[in-house]
Image (cartoon, rainbow, N blue to C red):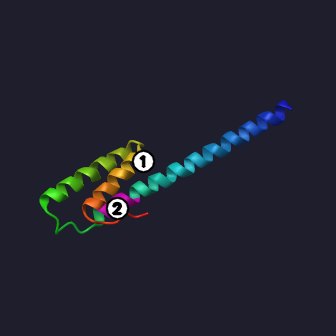
Amino acid sequence: MNRMFLVATAMFALTTGGIAHAEDGAKTDKCRRLQVQYDNADKSYFSAKTLSKANEHRQKGGDLCAKGKRETGIEELKTALQKLNIKPAK
């Protein structure tokens, strides 16, 4: 009985760890996609004030993603894109 419990516990730990890793990988990919989308956007026709605010959000979002705070970073990057009236990538 104890062996079965240990095996089941080990399988659960490995499975949930894999799920967490996959979710983190998806968030890392989303951070990257949003940063690239912002960086490649045509910003030539925005006012300096609008562009400055959007750039602040882009910088903050990129920094948060790099520090592992991906959910908050993703939200900042989305805000940066929305300031430029660009629909964030999924």
Under circle 1, the secondary element is helix
Residue 81 image point, x, y percent: 30, 60
Name the residue furthest right: 1
Question: What residue lies at 17% left-to-right and 68% top-to-bottom?
Answer: 44
Under circle 2, the secondary element is helix
- The picture quadrant where one finds residue 67 is top left
Residue 51 image point, x, y percent: 18, 59
Residues in magenta, as a range: 33-38
Is residue 37 one of those drawn in magenta? yes
- Say above or below: 6 vs 69: above
Image mark for residue 71: 1
Label 1 – label 2 distance at C-alpha:
17 Å
Q: Which quadrant of the rendered structure holds the C terminus?
A: bottom left
Residue 48 image point, x, y percent: 13, 59
| Label 2: how many Cα within 10 Å (few below 14, some 14–19, many 20+) | few
- The picture quadrant where one finds residue 68 is top left
If you read the primary sequence from the N terminus, does the residue marked by circle 1 or circle 2 appear first? Answer: 2
Question: What residue lies at 41% left-to-right and 43% top-to-bottom?
Answer: 69
